[in-house]
Image (cartoon, coloured by chain):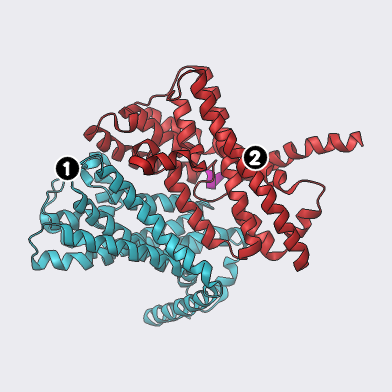
Chain colours: A cyan, B red
């Protein structure tokens, strides 16, 4: 019997919430470890910024961008990835679940598998990265010399949320890829964490071919590059018009279509290891 | 008696071979890791080009040397378990569940057993995840790789010493589970320090002032910075090479010695707990 689509979505969210709550309770059993790892999570990502800061102790501009301008890129990419990682990051554990056969248990539970996989071992410590990214973003906004218009102000929160959604779609597609490729969580990481590292630097640093790839194939440029270029009043190196900066939410919705299609295809192709 | 000694002599190479084979079975994971290291190599290489164009000769390296730094450190990353993936999570789990008692009853030395297994793992990852990214980097960029075979030999000795230093630190982290029960927090903090102080983020010669001087004498420098400098001939002449390798050997002795002390304290504690 086909369950109505809206019911499934509600069930999914409910199941997700319950599993998340369970993991949060379990995390809090070792409170010292939780505090250490949350702090560590923020510190790890802060080090990326310290590296940029050390670079700027030797130069005034990098790829033609100043430190506050790069901080805008850094903070928004970091907050977006942190948000996606918190909500969907553990989908990369599906490879382990397939190998040890525990995905089978998920298939028989009355909660959509994606919700279970996403909530699997929910890591609240990842708020560390979000907080740290937002802190750098706020510093950048204060340090920047920008003529704020309604459009630019609107773009700031939209950039972070839509960016998280684009990263999230990549994570779901990456998880689906593991149905085919087995234990390939690192491929997913190179698009998410690798993409994040790339987006922390100005697009002018990278080759045109790479820019085309992350604009038109895996649209990571919409996570923060295009909105941030608009806010900073700088032209896009590929010559795209200014209004594309406002397309990020649309791109986020559009990329979830292929991501959810490959996820369903992956799940249908799943054959249990029988162990 | 002599037979027992002879068996003992073969034990650790056999454990190392087991470690090598165990990781050799993860074919897809290795391929995925190669992909990730290559992607990160490209992203970092572009940012280094931007930085060294702005400031030629920064940190005492020309652009080809800086790019060599990027690609060789990507090749050493998995072998040295610099961002996790070594043995200490497994060891901590065995301590938590009490399985470590079985290890202690084995007619083998606990520290040498884990060292042998970890070197076997590292050996596989040096071949499996080291060679391809370096080749990709050498094809795409102009690198400063030496033609002198002696230099490569010294580099390999330096890499081996760096791997043992990395093991020495991670063994202490593993043992910490006797007191902490859950290792997640301390592992995350350790990765933070390793990323920052090994040279993986930026060559340590770029770190400014007294801060840079401190970072360059800490054990983490033995993992990336020293092998790279040996490879690129920064420690020219026999005296320079001896100093570099002696620095690493000194940290090997200190860390393995500290591991022994902590191990005897930990095993006494395990007996008290009765498991």
Picture quarter containing residue B115? top right
Asked if marks 2 and 1 fall on the same chain, the answer is no
Viewed as shown, does residue B126 lie left or right of A228? right
From mark 2 to mark 1, how far is it between C-alphas?
46 Å
Viewed as shown, does residue B155 lie left or right of A192? right
With respect to residue A243, does B152 lie above or below? Answer: above
Label 1 Cα neighbours within 10 Å, binned few <14 / some 14-19 / many ≥20: few
What's the mark number on residue A33? none
Give the x, y percent position of residue B51.
26, 37
Picture quarter containing residue B1? top right
User: Would residue B141 be visible to someone looking at this image?
Assistant: no
Q: Which residue is mark 2?
A: B120
Residue in view at x 37 percent, y 62 percent = A129
Give the x, y percent position of residue B231.
47, 26
Magenta-highlighted residues:
B26-30
Regarding mark 1 in the picture, which secondary structure is present there? loop
């Amino acid at each position: 019997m086909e369950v109505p689509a809206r019911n499934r979505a509600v069930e999914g969210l409910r199941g997700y919430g319950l599993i998340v709550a369970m993991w949060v309770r379990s995390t809090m059993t070792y409170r010292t470890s939780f505090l250490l790892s949350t702090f560590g999570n923020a510190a790890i990502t802060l080090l990326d910024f310290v590296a940029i800061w050390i670079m700027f102790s030797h130069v005034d501009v990098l790829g033609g961008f100043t430190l506050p301008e790069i901080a805008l890129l850094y903070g928004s990419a970091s907050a977006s990835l942190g948000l996606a990682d918190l909500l969907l990051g553990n989908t990369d554990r599906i490879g382990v679940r397939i190998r040890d056969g525990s995905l089978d248990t998920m298939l028989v539970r009355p909660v959509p598998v994606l919700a279970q996989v996403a909530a699997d071992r929910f890591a609240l410590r990842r708020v560390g990265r979000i907080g740290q990214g937002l802190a750098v973003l706020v510093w950048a906004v204060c340090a920047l010399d920008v003529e704020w218009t309604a459009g630019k102000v609107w773009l700031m929160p939209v950039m972070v949320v839509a960016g998280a959604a684009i990263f999230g779609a990549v994570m779901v597609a990456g998880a689906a890829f593991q149905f085919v490729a087995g234990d390939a969580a690192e491929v997913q990481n190179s698009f998410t964490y690798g993409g994040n590292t790339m987006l922390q630097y100005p697009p002018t640093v990278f080759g045109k071919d790479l820019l085309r790839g992350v604009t038109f194939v895996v649209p990571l440029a919409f996570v923060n590059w295009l909105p941030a270029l608009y806010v900073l009043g700088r032209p896009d190196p590929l010559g795209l018009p200014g209004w594309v900066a406002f397309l990020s939410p649309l791109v986020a919705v559009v990329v979830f279509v292929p991501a959810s299609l490959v996820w369903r295809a992956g799940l249908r192709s799943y054959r249990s290891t029988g162990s | 008696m002599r037979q027992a000694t002879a068996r003992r002599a073969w034990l650790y190479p056999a454990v190392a071979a087991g470690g090598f084979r165990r990781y050799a079975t993860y074919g897809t994971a290795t391929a995925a890791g190669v992909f990730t290291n290559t992607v990160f190599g490209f992203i970092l290489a572009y940012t280094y080009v931007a930085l060294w164009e702005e400031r030629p000769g920064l940190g005492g390296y020309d652009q080809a040397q800086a790019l060599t730094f990027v690609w060789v450190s990507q090749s050493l990353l998995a072998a040295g378990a610099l961002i996790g993936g070594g043995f200490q999570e497994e060891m901590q789990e065995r301590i938590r569940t009490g399985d470590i008692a079985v290890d202690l009853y084995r007619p083998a030395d606990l520290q040498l057993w884990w060292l042998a297994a970890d070197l076997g793992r590292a050996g596989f990852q040096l071949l499996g995840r080291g060679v391809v990214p370096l080749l990709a980097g050498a094809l795409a960029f102009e690198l400063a790789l030496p033609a002198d075979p002696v230099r490569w030999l010294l580099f390999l000795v330096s890499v081996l010493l760096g791997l043992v230093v990395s093991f020495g630190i991670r063994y202490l982290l593993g043992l910490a589970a006797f007191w902490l029960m859950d290792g997640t927090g301390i592992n995350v903090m350790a990765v933070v320090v390793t990323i920052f102080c090994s040279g993986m983020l930026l060559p340590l010669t770029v770190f400014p002032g007294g801060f840079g001087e401190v970072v360059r004498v800490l054990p983490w420098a033995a993992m990336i910075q020293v092998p790279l400098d040996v490879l690129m001939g920064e420690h020219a002449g026999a005296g320079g090479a001896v100093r570099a390798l002696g620095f690493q050997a000194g940290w090997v002795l200190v860390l393995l010695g500290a591991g022994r002390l902590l191990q005897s304290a930990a095993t006494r504690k395990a007996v008290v707990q009765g498991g």
